[in-house]
Amino acid sequence: MTATEATEHDLAEPAPKASAGAVPQPAPGATAPQAPPLIAKAAAELVGTAALVAVVVGSGIQATELTKDVGLQLLANSTATVFGLGVLIALFGPVSGAHFNPAVTLAEWWTARRGGAGVTLRETAAYVPAQIVGAIAGAVLADAMFGEPLVKWSTHERSAGHLLLGEVVATAGLILLIFGLARTDRLRFAPVAVASYIGAAYWFTSSTSFANPAVTIGRAFTDTFAGIAPASVPGFIGVQLVGAVVGLALVALIFMPGRSEGG
């Protein structure tokens, strides 16, 4: 689900970096911390995304084994996702920014393309495949833990127009939240804020808020509660990218740089 984090940016001009788990700044006179190597960042994105999908899929399987009430199943699934995502952002944020989401990574790269701080094209090329591989691995791991077939294509069709609209809304809101927090220098709240938003979006969007292309791909590999049929994946990813564009446009509109009194 979507899952979850990004770096600080300015859509109109370069801005200092701020990811969903920003690297602490040194005290005056102290040695500045070195940025983690790219392999460490990619590993954090892979492991974090795998853990996120394992939480989503695993809690869905557990819920369906414990109750036949679909409402309780969704409550259990969303609650586990909220806590799991918050922990993962807090843990991996200082290393990679805790994106776990190609839509977030691409949005950050786009906003940093004019030379501002953020993920580079090289980092983006490492992050996105790591996120996709991690998502698939997380789904396989969850199936293994519950004795399900390791890979069984989902049969849950999710292609109706209202579901696609739900994904646009879910993804736009996620991008608006992350980059809005960055614009207002409040990314310290990201673990709670992003996890809370995803938990709420489980319930207020018709699609239950995947809002993440990598997680969408991973969830096609499991024919369980959280699965999505492979035929539905391209449509979901397409509207998620549309949602990311809408979210960035809202950030530019709402968090527009102010003018001085004399200007």
Image: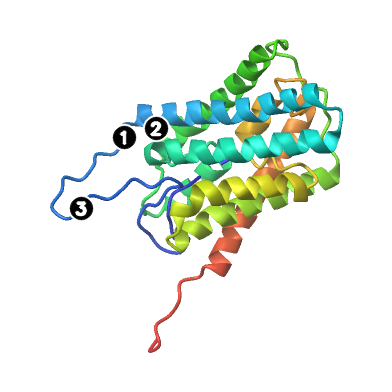
Q: Is residue 187 visible?
A: yes
| Residue 82 versus residue 13 in the image, above or below | above
Residue drawn 75% across and 27% down? Answer: 63
Q: What residue sits right under mark 1 in the picture?
A: 36
**Of tags 3 and 1, which is closer to the observer?**
3
Tell me the quarter of the image containing the C terminus.
bottom left
Callouts 1 and 2 close, C-beta under 8 Å: yes
Disc 3, SS: loop
Q: Residues within 10 Å of mark 3 (few under 14, many from 20)?
A: few
Q: Position of residue 214 (x, y in %)?
A: 61, 32
Q: Amino acid at mark 1?
A: Pro
Between the C-alphas of marks 3 and 2, the distance is 24 Å
Give residue 60's quadrant in the image: top right
Q: Earlier in the sequence, mark 3 or mark 1?
A: 3
Q: Position of residue 128 (x, y in %)?
A: 52, 33
Q: Residues within 10 Å of mark 2 (few under 14, many from 20)?
A: many
Q: What residue sits right under mark 2 in the picture?
A: 41
Q: Amino acid at mark 2?
A: Lys
Q: Left of 109 or right of it: where is 28?
A: left
Say the numbered circle drawn on residue 27.
3
Q: Position of residue 52 (x, y in %)?
A: 58, 31
